[in-house]
Each structure stands twice: as structure tokens, then as C-alpha cells.
Amino acid sequence: MKSAEYQIVHETSYRYSEPVALCQNQLRMRPRNHSHLVCHSCEVAITPTPTSLHQHTDYFGNVVDSFSIESLHQSLQVRVASRVTVSIPSDENLSGAPDWRELIGVIRRGEQPADWLASEYTFASRRIELTDMFADYARKVMQPHASVVDAVQALTVQINNDFRYDTQATDVNTSTEEAFIQKAGVCQDFAHIQIACLRSLGLAVRYVSGYLRTYPPPGKPRLVGCDESHAWIGVYAGEKIGWVDFDPTNAVRAGTDHIPMCLGRDYDDISPMRGIVMGGGKPILKVSVDVLPLDSSPTA
Amino acid sequence: MAAPFSLAHCEQPAGRYDECRSEEGHIRPHWATIESMLNRIGASGLNDRSLQIEQLIREHGLTFQFDVDQKPGQLGSVPVALEDQDWTGLSAGLAQRVRVLEAVLDDLLGPQTLIRERIIPREVLWGNPFFYRAFHQLQRTEESVSEESAGIGAVSRSKRLHVTAFDVVRGDSGRWWVTGDRTRAPSGLGHLLENRIVLSRALPHAHRSANVRRLAPFFKSLREHFRALTPRAMENPRVALLTPGAGSYREFEDSYLARYLGYTLVQGRDLAVRGERLNLKTLGGLLPIEVLWRHVSDQNCDPLELDPASLEGCTGLLQTIRDGHVSVVNSIGAAIAEMPALLPFLDASAKKLLGEELILPSVATYWCGDEQPCRFVLNNLDKLIIRSAHWVKEFEPMIPEQMTSQQRGELRRRIKAQPHRYVGQERLSHSLTPVWSDGQLQPWHFTLRSFQLQTADGVEVLPGGLARVSPAPELLGGSARSGLMTQDCWIVSDEPVDHEETLLTAESQTIRLRRGGAELPSRVADHLFWLGRYTERCESIARLLRTTLTRLAGEDELDELSEMPRLIHALAAMGQLEPDYAIEGLNGAMPRPDVMLPDSVFDCGTTRGLQSAAVGALRNASAVRDRIPLDAYRILRSLHHEVVVQGRPRGGDVISAIERLNRCVTLLLAFSGLAAESLTRTHGWRFVLLGRRIERAHQTAELLLATMAEPMRDESSLCEAILDATDSLMTYRSRYLSITQPAPTIDLLVTDESNPRSLRFQMQDIEQVLLELPTSAKQVGLGEDERIAADLTRRLLVADIANLCHCEPDMKRVALAALLDSVCATMPKLANAIEARYLIHTSVSQSLTGEPDKHAPLAFSPMSLP
């Protein structure tokens, strides 16, 4: 096992050109406990003070904060501060990963409860259409007798090679198919494309939102608040191994530098913040993310 | 003597189940009353009844149906009679089916045992694009509800299904089959109620003597049940019926049901979640809603958590449900229980969850997600109906037999590509029932939409239902409105039935007297405001057009009419003529006024001022149809017909244009009279009045600005035309006889506080009305709207008539133009201020994502934009 501990501060602030009479919001910004992550603490601070504030757990097990602000306000700040430990199984644990083509059959049959439950992530979802176009692209890269970990790793690298990271190429309304055709996009698009490829083959894949630890250039100090929220994918690798995360934007298997927050079928299930405001004119958004490693020494 | 008219006149095809006759051709006993009625009234009597029914339906349609283009439904004059005992058997099956679907839904939106144990294939749920995961565990379970408050309410509130409907048909053997489930928000309840009310008026005697089981007890239970659903114990909870809004096929039914049951009819725009509760937005503030009967689709209920593009629901609704502060009927996600893909697995599900066998069989249904049924469907396309597996409304059912071979090939490809999204369904044969059509009794195919109510005590089945009939069975496949005709359905009892209960008359308890007002929903106030504006705009333009055309019809030659360019200028300023026509000196390039003006009157397009105002008036009146007198609505429909629908009459000259405008002005005066005499002085009326006053001030100022700002050599005929167009000529003549001059004209139309057409009079009225509207307790001093109005009133008050008429050396009435300009500029500001103060809830919303460059403003287009 390798593990790392982090303090993450994610601040989102809106300044409105005109007063807002009402805002209703949902946050999916709390890291959730699961096999790779322990959340030690998480504090959500909202300014102005919400009129109502509720918490519930959604279908996928993510913790949702719903809040409303019902008096006139000119700005909104959401600050989420969490302390987490990420643990990743060492590479030897993945050596027994099943042949990816056999795994497809295993998931389809769903004889083990874990396989059966994972199969919910083989279906199309709002942002993921399953088509031959995606399947054909993936098949060219994924070697017939490779283990699912190796095959998906190859696809992760291939997507990173074939697609251009470009913040101007897509927006929130761009479909996965469009992003695939124009061969460009941001981390969400990369993740959606890889999910579409793997699900089109019959594998179970989920969308992971979270953060990425960044390293300052050698000799430079770490800059506070310059990190970003990130997104990648989790692939089901059979009941023994469970879910393994890959990051197509950075062409790597996710390690302890990847700090997952929420899990779902695609971005729409777990967008970190979604809200509706009345009024507001032209809002100015400022986001700052700070990922501070507390202890990064690998343990046995 | 010929044999009396009888059911026997209806042809009896062999091999099919005949509702009214046994196989041997004997009239079934429960049809005896209908038979004797036919004997008595004969074919001609039946014809008379049919006409009477048509008349009543049309009248109802006018009252409750807002969409002017929708054809009213047809109701047959012969009911379908079912025998009490037969019905009892069917009812038991229907009631059981409600319990089964409740259990299935509760499982699918909860523990999903049926999926885990593979009783229902996972593709049916997990692969269903209409299964929003937010539906899951949204509703609180019985245990968690009853922890807080035990009792009937808690049990009722834990249910997901309250009002359900099933489509049933009777096969050749006489056995009933279910062909479709409706668990979301079944339509047809209003129609069947209307059918019963209309038919019992047309056939009063037959209806009573046949011992027909009554519908009223069902509706009474429904009301009691809804009352019990309220999350907080209270005497008189507010129940609101959420309807998709104007233009929906639900319009008629929803307004009919709301009025019959005494529920507030609301649209998404009327609702707001504030302080963790669902509220109705009114002028007087927010009023909590306890129970929401929603007739909008599941995914449209909350843009925050479900489909973000929908405006039919209310932001934050799901959270209030999670908090247990509102009960929604049927619970959101209930559409999952009506998906056709469940049908093949319903039997096994019932056994698993309730340990029961289904009493009532479902029509044979083959889900293509399984290999074998899929092969069967592809091999037997011509015998089947193809439906969406996941959502009945995803697409219309398809009948491959009626397709071209190319279409069939395409369908085959689609099924093979995504088999789990399709089901094939057997086409059942229907029983036949006599229908009076084209002057004879004909055996038509019959299907029944039956309704159930699930309460804490169990399931109550409505005795009867919406009977749909059609000469071709294919037409009966779809919605409650499909089929050619509906019929009343009688459950004929052996014993006399109690006729006392009805919801139409007042209830036993005394209603507390009240003066309405502040409860006016903001949206309604908005529509009424624009109704006032549009009718006034119509009148101003129609009057000016008429005045101008009357001049053309006189003896004078066109070039002798010195006032003509100014009047045309004014008509262009009001949007009736192309703006180019207002430019003097371009006369040569323009069509002659005696061509161009009638053209503008007879133009059926809706870009011109008069036409678009008539459309606007009717549209806004339609949207608040349940708030204004029927006669007012009729007037506006006639106006709409006159101006937009009718088109150009033969000839279509100046004279016929004047005649049409005469009719328009008369209709508009009738509307004003009605508004003045028949509307109670509530806030609603005040908004109509405000709209009228603001519009009149604006139009009058525009008219004077276009005509009087620059003096002409001889202004007497121009002044006369202006006075005529503003309905002030009589007043003028009574004061000044026949000498028309600018100064008294300007005085009468601008500064005279006693002339209801003057600018000052408008402002006086506006100030008064603003004073009467509710004011927030927090407000100190004048509101923005009142300040704007007071400022303009003051300017009109201090205006000196000599100064206004004074002409500068450059031939302009500078003071007059400045004053009129400020009126024209103030009116939109005033309207905005009023909207901001009273109708603020309808402001623009936008969505936040917390990510850069991804702000997608929600399209929000209130109908009131001019």
C-alpha cells in the first residue's frame, strides 16, 4: 500500500453585478470514504449564511449539501476544507487482474454480487452514448489477451496522445461524441471519452471527481491556491481487485497524487456545484484550490 | 307498425364479445334501461340528445379549454353499461394491481431486491434513461414517517401511488386484460367526470332509473385522502394542482378538476420553495402549499436536480420532499411503475413481494432485451405493437403491419441496435359496444380507462371510467385522448343507489365569508396587467385607423386632406404601418392610403400593431381564463376572430375596413364595460386597470407627438381627427361647438383632469390604484413605482396650456414635445417598476456550476413581453 495525507481547501466565489434575490444550490464537494480514501474531516463554510442547509447521501453514496440563500446578496463564497488520506494498492496487487475480454463476460453474467453491482456502470448515461465508434477506437489499442489493467492503461496513454488538452475547445454543453470527433477538450471530456470507449465494450466504468497534487518546478516553492479540481475514471477490474482509477488527461494510472472526491456515472451525476440564482446580472467567478500534502512518505 | 328502435339495430359480428347482447342475441339485463330508452325516444330522439351533448361539451370546452385551436372531445350519446358483479371481479384485480405496482415501485426506488434477485432484468431499470437516480429514496419510507407522527396521514404519506389508472379491454372470451398502466399522472379523470355530468343532463331519466353507481363518492374519498396527506395537521390544507400550462392537452381537464374539487390550479411559475416549504407566489406574499397534485412529468418537476431545461416544475421541490414538508401526488419517480418493460415480470414480482398471483392478466408483452422474446418480436412484427420499453411517452406506439417494408426494416435495425429499449405487445381483440354515429347504431371497439385511489385504508376503484370507442382498434392504443369518441361508462347495480352525494353543490360545512385579494398569484397579476395593456392598445389603434379611413371615404380628394400625412405618421408610430411611411416627402414611393390602410386592416399576419395586440390580449386572457368572466373571454375571442382569423372580405375596400373596425371598437367597448361593471374590485381588477391606464397614456402621448408637436397652417381638421380618434370629439363640441383649435384640443387631451381620455386623468387613476395595492410593512415612504407616477403627475399638473401651445420660431411646440416625450419615456419605466415591485418573482434566473465559462442562463420568457 502507498498512502498520502492531504489538506485540501477549495474556494468558490461569485461576485454578482446585480443583487441576487434567491439562490438554491447543491454541492458535491465532500470527499467520501471508500476503499482508496479516508476522510478525516471536512468543513463546508458558506457566506452569506444560508437560509436553509441540508445534507443527504445520494444514490451513488456521495454526500450532498443542499442550501438556499433567500435574502438579497451580492456575492457567494463556498469554502470546503478537508483532510484526507489516500491509499493505493501497490502494483503487485494488480498483477492478477483478469483478461479484459473475459471480464466483460464475468460482468455480464454477474454471478458474484460485486460483479453484478458493478454492472450498473456498463450502461449508457446522460453524457455517455454507447456506439461502435467508441468501441472500435478502444479495440485498436487494447491487446486481445491483455489484463484489464494493462489494456486500459494502453487506452489511457492512447487518448492522451490522440487528444489535445484545450480549454477553449469544449464547454459544458459539448457532447462526448463532439469532443471525440474534434479530438480536444478538458479533463471532463477526456474522462467521458474513455468511459464511452470502455462501456461500449461492456466494461464497468465510473466517473471520478477530485483533485490532483501538483509539484512545483525544481527549486521553486509550492504556490498556494494554484491547484485545480480534476476528473478521471475508475474501471472495475473484477471482484478481487475492485476499482482501479486511470487519468487519461495525464496518461497515468491514478496514484496517491489523485485525491478522489465523488463517484458517479458521468459529470452530470456529480457536478461539484450546481445551482440556480434569480437575478445576479453578470457574475464573476473565482475558484482557488489548494492541495497541501501533509505526509507523503510511502509506507510498506 | 314498425318495430321500435332498439339495440338490436346494431349489427352483431360473430365471434366477438358483444357488450350489450349475449351470444344468442338477447339484450343483456343490465342494458335494459338503455334499451327501453331507445325504444322510447327512437332514432330521432337519439339524434336530438347527440346535438344537445355536443352543445354542452362545446360550452364546457369554452369554459375550461384555453387553447382556442383544440377541438372539443366527442362524447357518444349511448353509454357503455357494465354489470355490477362483473365489475366487482374486475375491481378486485384492479385494486390488487395498484398494490403490486406500489410494491414494485417501492422496491425499485429502494432496496432493488427485484433487480438483485433477477426477477426484473437490470437493463429495465439501470439501462432506463428515464430513471433519474434522484428518484431513488426520495420519498420517506413508512417507518421513517411514522417515527414522527403516527396515524392515517403517516401511512398515506408513505405511499408512492395515490391516483392510478389502468387501460383494460375485454377479449373475445369475455375476460378482462390490462393493456397499459398509468401511474404517473393519469389523464382522463376530468373527462370522465365531464362525460357523466353532461350525459346525466342529456339523459336524466335513464340515468336514474338504471341504478348507475355514482362517481361522487370516489371524488369525495379523493378529497379526504388528499387532506390526510398534509404533512402538518391542519383544518384546511392548501392543495394545488400543478398543470403543465397553456397549450398542453391537460389544460381542459386540469382546470375542470381543479374547479370541481376546489383546488388551486397552478403552473411552475406560480411556485417557489422558500423557508424549506413549497409556496404559492401571490401579490400578498407567499402562501404555503401542503399537497401538490402534479400533472407534469417526473423529470420536469425540479430543474435543480432533474431536467435543468424544464420550467414546468419548481426549483428545490425535491429537497422539500426529502424534508417531508410537502406531499406530492403521485410521488416523483412513479413513472417507473408504468414502463411497459415491467409487464412480462409483473407476475413474478407480485409473487416475490406480496406472495400473490395476479388476478388480472396483462396483455402479452415481449421485452426485446432478452434474446428469445426479441427473436419472437422480430419474427412476428406484423402481429404486434412496438412500444418504448422504458417510458410510455417516449414515442407513439408503432404498428409494423401498417408500415412500408422500408420502415419495417428501419424498425428492425433500431430494435437490434438497442433491444432493451423496445417491447412488442400482442394486439388484443376488443369487445364491441353500440355507438351512435352517422345516424345509426354501429358496433365499435371499446377500451376502458379505469381509475383507482390508494388510501391508508386500501384501494378504492372508481365505478366506471373513461370509455373510449373507435371503429378501428388501432386508434385505441395511445393516450386518454386517442380513439374517436368517449362514452360514459355505467356500472349498473341491482339495487337503487344513493343519489345524495355530490361535490357540485356546497358541502355540509358552512363556508366562511371572505373578501379575496392578496391571494392573487403574481403570474395571474402579470397576465391581467398585460390583458389591460393589449386591449387598450387595440382600441387606440382601431380608433385611429377608423378615423383615418373615414376621412378617405369622404368627398374630399386625397391631396385636399392636409391632416393625412400626420395621421399616417401616427399610425406608423403605433406600429400599424411600416415606419418608412412616416417619412414625409416619400409619398410618391408609397402605396396610396386608400390601398395601404385597408391592407393593414385585413392583413392576417401578426406583426402589425392591431393584430399583434389582439393576439396578445387573447393569449393573456387565455392564461387566466379561470379568473375572468366567460363573457370577457368570448369578447376577446370574437375580436381575435375579427382581426386575425377572418381574413380579407370580398372587395376589401375602405368601407369594409371601416365596418370591421366599427365591430372591433364595439367589442372593445363591451370589454371595457364588462371590466368596469362585472369585475370585483380585487387586486386582479387593479392590474387590468393599471395596464389600461399606462397604455392609454402612452398611446395618447405617441399620437399627439406624431401629430401636434409641429404646427401646420390649418390645424382644424387635424384636431378634429385627433379628437375623434381619442373619443373626445363629443366633449369638445359640447364645450366649444364646431370651432376646432389646437389649444382647447391639447388641453382636453393633456391637462384636463375630468376627461377620462386625458393624460392627467390616466396618471390620477394610476396613482390611486398604486395606493390601493398591498405595501410591504417594511416599506417607508413611496415605492419606486409611486415615485415615478407622482413625478409625472406633478409635471402634468404644473403644465401651462399657453406654454404648451407656444410655437418657437423654428415651428415647434417645444414645451409640448418635451412633456409628451417624457410621458413616452416614463411609461415603460413605470411598467418596469410595477413589475419589479409586484411581479418580481418572475425575474430571470441563471444557473451556477462553480466552473469557469459555463454559465448557461435558463431561457425564461414570460408571455408579457410586448
Image (tube, coloured by chain):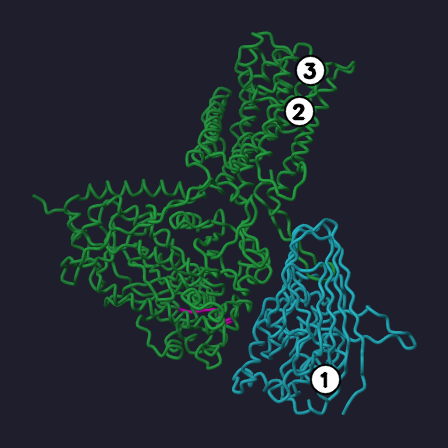
Chain colours: A cyan, B green
Q: Can residue B409 be seen at all in this image of the molecule?
A: no
Distance (Cα) linking label 3 and label 2: 27 Å
Type of amino acid at the residue the image marks with label 3: Ile
Q: Residue at x 43, y 59 (%)?
A: B185
Q: Are marks 3 and 2 on the same chain?
A: yes
Q: Residue at x 67, y 27 (%)?
A: B580
Type of amino acid at the residue the image marks with label 2: Ala
- Stretch in magenta: B416-424
Distance (Cα) linking label 1 and label 2: 78 Å
Q: Residue at x 74, y 66 (%)?
A: A79
**Circles 3 and 1: CB distance less than 8 Å?**
no
Give coordinates of residue B190: x percent, y percent.
37, 51
In this view, B475 is above or below B75: below
Q: Chain of mark 1?
A: A
Residue at numbered disc 1? A87
Distance (Cα) linking label 3 and label 1: 88 Å
Give coordinates of residue B410: x percent, y percent.
48, 65
Q: Residues within 10 Å of mark 3 (few under 14, many from 20)?
A: some
Residue at numbered disc 3? B801
Which comes sooner in the sequence, label 3 or label 2? 2
Camera-side residue of B452 and B311 = B452
Secondary structure of the residue carrying numbered label 2: helix
In this view, B283 is above or below A242: above
Q: Chain of mark 3?
A: B
Residue at numbered disc 2? B582
Secondary structure of the residue carrying numbered label 3: helix
Type of amino acid at the residue the image marks with label 1: Ser
In this view, B409 is above or below B567: below
